């Protein structure tokens, strides 16, 4: 019963919320068509003023314009309410106005007597001033700002969409975050487009107020003189006073809504509301000191109102002193006294750096990590850590960003465990335009190479963003450049981030789901050190640890087989694991329905490599340098066409030569997998794009074979 009552109450509440707007719209129509009593008219005027005040307060306290995205629609209905009240009040003024000011309601009478002192001439002048302020100053300026903002927002929409796609492709954003960003960009363009049109409501309302005032005056004078036999002076005193009071009642909330519209369209995005934003920017003692000095000089001049200017100067001086004192206390914390023992003490933290991932920046890049400017680099690094952790299968450690005065102002350096992996330069106030290969017109800028992929690029000023996007460039900011470079280097060197603690974390997580599997894996047949070493080897070869359950099962089988072999080693276990997870390796290269493009070795070259490895024994480089250079050069020539198409491919060789060939090719082809025939699933179609070594053979590019066909070709080539 309670559940039924609560659900019924929720349903009634939702129904009531859904019915408020249609009922309010019908009331507006009733105000325009049917006669309304003066009491109801008074309630409508007070409600109109209340709504205008509420809208103004909400507009002043939002952090960004999109937080009040319903403002254009609210402005429309508020304008309709005010016009409906004007129509109803006009009917009352013309029909009942001859009875006196009280006939049109207490609100109109109060505005007519209190604000303009019962003098209709004063009322006309006050109304004219309000109209000039509203129509000429506020409404016209807000309309121009809305128009320009809408045009620039729509012009920048393609560039923002491309930037989101670039961040998504670089791993800086997850698909959900990219979807939210696209929705935010679309909402922003819709909002400013609506505000461009909504500003016309305010302007039209102001013009309608003037016309309604003229109609009320002329109509009232005609009715008073000819229908009610009033003198010209009495008719003017009565109807002009009522018309001006009615106009002022409508123009006060109209002025409030105009101020709200202007405040919304002139806002700059900030984490603070408008009062906090203005207060923080005015809290500068350097700006108030000249104000105090000028006021003091003015207060000492003869004939000036000394008792007004000097107290204001004193208050301003006190405010400046308080701001200066607060700034000093914030920037200069009190030093802590140290004892002689503390001064001579050296802690481990003074000689070691606990951060594994480090980014060193020059002082020119400090704005990218400044919290007052949103710290865009830190936000992107957080997104990269989250994305890399999902892809690699373990938690990527925190990134420490610190300044290094030894670097040039715009230089940065990326390090893992103190080893520098890459360094380049970025300009925080400029944008990097990447050559996408389809450039219509060259844009002027500082030529450079993209630090991640080596593409031809230009550093351009923000004013040239639209021009560069139209010309075919992909435009990104400095924080994206550094973050993308960081993402690329960390992805290639993920094995350097994995240790025994990370291995224990994977085991603890797996133990909650499969405790027996963990007990069968460690401490026997594999220790924690061996598991960490195997995982590091897999990561170094580009194999993620996402499916650690399947990897653990493969480790148990590989360790059991290796224990029964004549020469057990971790390399053999790694090869055994790779053989059992071949489908996991392949699915990260190509979609399941497409064939895997591969480059294979000629049979004679395979035999030559196998003999060199057997004769070399335990040598780390059993292949002579001359042969290594020939193999690398041949693979570069064979891979050039498919690399130009930006397609992933693999190099396939025999199990005995796989590890050696990987060492040979890794410097020239980082990230390109080297597989053995045993790692290819039997049901996976392949596409042989080239055969390295021996005599070149012409093969159809669309030919697809399974792994057994590959073995047969290797033997008969």
Image (cartoon, helix red, strand yellow):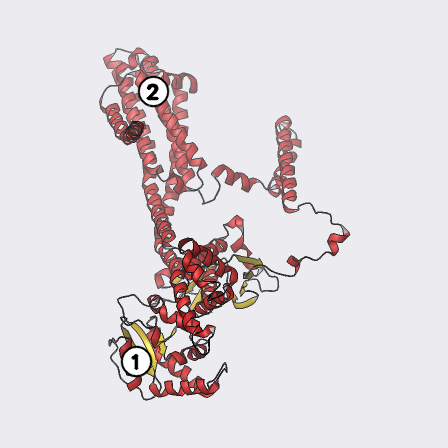
The quadrant the C terminus occupies is bottom left
Q: Earlier in the sequence, mark 2 or mark 1?
A: 2
Vertical position of residue 574 compared to residue 377: above or below: below
Residue 701 can be seen in this image = yes
Q: Which image quadrant is residue 410 in?
A: bottom right
Please give left or right for residue 260 compared with residue 425 in the image.
left
The quadrant the N terminus occupies is top left
Q: Considering depth in this image, is 276 or 129 the residue closer to the camera? A: 276
Give residue 640's position: percent from left, percent from top: 35, 77
Q: Which image quadrant is residue 73 in?
A: top left
Please give left or right for residue 683 compared with residue 394 in the image.
left
Which residue is under mark 1? Answer: 711
Give residue 84's position: percent from left, percent from top: 28, 26
Q: Considering depth in this image, is 415 or 221 the residue closer to the camera? A: 415
Identify the secondary structure beneath mark 1: helix
Spatial CA distance of label 2 from label 1 is 90 Å
Give residue 317's position: percent from left, percent from top: 64, 35
Give residue 234's position: percent from left, percent from top: 33, 12
Q: Considering depth in this image, is 280 or 545 the residue closer to the camera? A: 545
Vertical position of residue 183 compared to residue 89: above or below: below
Identify the secondary structure beneath mark 2: helix
Vertical position of residue 542 compared to residue 2: above or below: below
Q: Which residue is drawn at 35% across and 43% down?
A: 191
Which residue is under mark 2? Answer: 43
Counting every numbered tag in the picture gives: 2
Residue 670 can be seen in this image = no
Q: Considering depth in this image, is 336 or 595 the residue closer to the camera? A: 595
Q: Residue at x 43, y 65 (%)?
A: 444
Q: Which residue lies furthest to the front in this view?
A: 564
Q: Around disc 2, counting alpha carbons within 10 Å, would you say few (fewer than 14), some (14 to 19), or many (20 or more)?
A: few
């Amino acid at each position: 019963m309670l559940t039924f009552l609560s659900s019924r109450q929720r349903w009634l509440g939702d129904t009531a919320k859904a019915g408020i707007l249609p009922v309010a719209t019908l009331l507006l129509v009733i105000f325009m068509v049917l006669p309304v009593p003066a009491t109801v008219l008074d309630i409508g005027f007070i409600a109109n003023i209340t709504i205008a005040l509420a809208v103004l307060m909400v507009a002043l306290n939002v952090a960004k314009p999109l937080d009040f995205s319903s403002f254009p629609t609210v402005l429309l209905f508020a304008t309709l309410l005010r016009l409906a009240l004007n129509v109803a009040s006009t009917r009352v003024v013309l029909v009942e106005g001859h009875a006196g000011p009280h006939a049109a309601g207490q609100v109109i009478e109060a505005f007519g007597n209190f604000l303009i002192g019962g003098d209709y001439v004063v009322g006309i002048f006050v109304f004219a001033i309000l109209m000039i302020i509203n129509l000429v100053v506020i409404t016209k300026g807000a309309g121009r700002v809305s128009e320009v903002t809408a045009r620039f927002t729509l012009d920048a929409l393609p560039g923002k969409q491309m930037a989101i796609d670039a961040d998504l492709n670089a791993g800086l954003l997850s698909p959900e975050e990219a979807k939210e960003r696209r929705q935010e960009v679309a909402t922003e363009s819709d909002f400013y487009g609506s505000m461009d049109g909504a500003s016309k409501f305010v302007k039209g309302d102001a013009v309608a107020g003037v016309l309604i005032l003229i109609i009320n005056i002329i109509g009232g004078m005609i009715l008073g003189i000819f229908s009610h036999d009033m003198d010209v002076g009495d008719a003017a005193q009565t109807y002009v006073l009522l018309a001006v009071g009615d106009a002022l009642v409508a123009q006060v909330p109209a002025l409030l809504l105009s101020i709200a519209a202007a405040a919304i369209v002139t806002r700059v995005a900030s984490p603070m509301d408008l009062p906090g934003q203005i207060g923080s920017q005015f809290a500068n003692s350097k700006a108030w000191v000249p104000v105090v000095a000028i006021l003091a000089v003015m207060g000492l001049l003869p004939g000036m109102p000394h008792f007004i200017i000097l107290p204001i100067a004193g208050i301003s001086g006190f405010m400046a002193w308080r701001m200066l004192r607060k700034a000093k206390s914030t920037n200069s914390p009190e030093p802590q006294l140290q004892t002689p023992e503390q001064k001579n003490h050296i802690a481990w933290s003074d000689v070691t750096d606990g951060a594994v991932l480090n980014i060193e920046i020059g002082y020119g890049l400090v704005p990218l990590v400044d919290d007052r400017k949103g710290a865009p680099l830190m936000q992107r690094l957080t997104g990269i850590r989250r994305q890399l952790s999902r892809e690699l299968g373990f938690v990527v450690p925190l990134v420490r960003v610190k300044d290094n005065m030894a670097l040039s102002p715009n230089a940065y350096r990326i390090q893992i465990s103190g080893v520098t992996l890459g360094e380049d330069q970025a300009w925080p106030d400029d944008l990097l335009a990447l050559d996408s290969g389809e450039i219509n017109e060259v844009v002027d800028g500082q030529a450079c190479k993209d630090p991640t992929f080596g593409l031809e690029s230009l550093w351009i000023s923000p004013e040239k963003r639209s021009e560069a996007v139209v010309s075919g460039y992909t435009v990104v900011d400095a924080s994206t450049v550094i973050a993308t470079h960081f993402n690329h280097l960390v992805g290639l060197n993920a094995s350097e981030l994995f240790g025994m603690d990370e291995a224990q974390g994977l085991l603890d997580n797996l133990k909650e789901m499969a405790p027996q599997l963990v007990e069968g894996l460690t401490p026997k047949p594999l220790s924690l050190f061996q598991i960490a070493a195997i995982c590091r080897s897999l990561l170094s070869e580009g194999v993620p640890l996402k499916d650690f359950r399947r990897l653990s099962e493969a480790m148990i089988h590989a360790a059991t087989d290796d224990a029964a072999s004549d020469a057990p080693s971790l390399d053999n276990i790694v090869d055994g694991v790779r053989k059992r997870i071949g489908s996991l390796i392949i699915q990260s290269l190509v979609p399941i329905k497409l064939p895997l493009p591969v480059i294979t070795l000629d049979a004679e070259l395979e035999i030559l490599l196998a003999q060199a490895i057997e004769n070399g024994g335990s040598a780390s480089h059993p292949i002579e340098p001359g042969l290594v250079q020939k193999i690398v050069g041949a693979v570069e020539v064979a891979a050039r066409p498919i690399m130009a198409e930006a397609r992933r491919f693999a190099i396939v060789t025999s199990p005995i030569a796989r590890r050696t060939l990987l060492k040979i090719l890794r410097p020239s082809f980082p990230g390109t997998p080297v597989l053995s025939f045993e790692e290819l699933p039997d049901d996976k179609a392949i596409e042989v794009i080239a055969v390295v070594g021996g005599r070149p053979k012409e093969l159809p590019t669309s030919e697809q074979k399974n792994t057994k066909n590959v073995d047969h070709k290797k033997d008969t080539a």
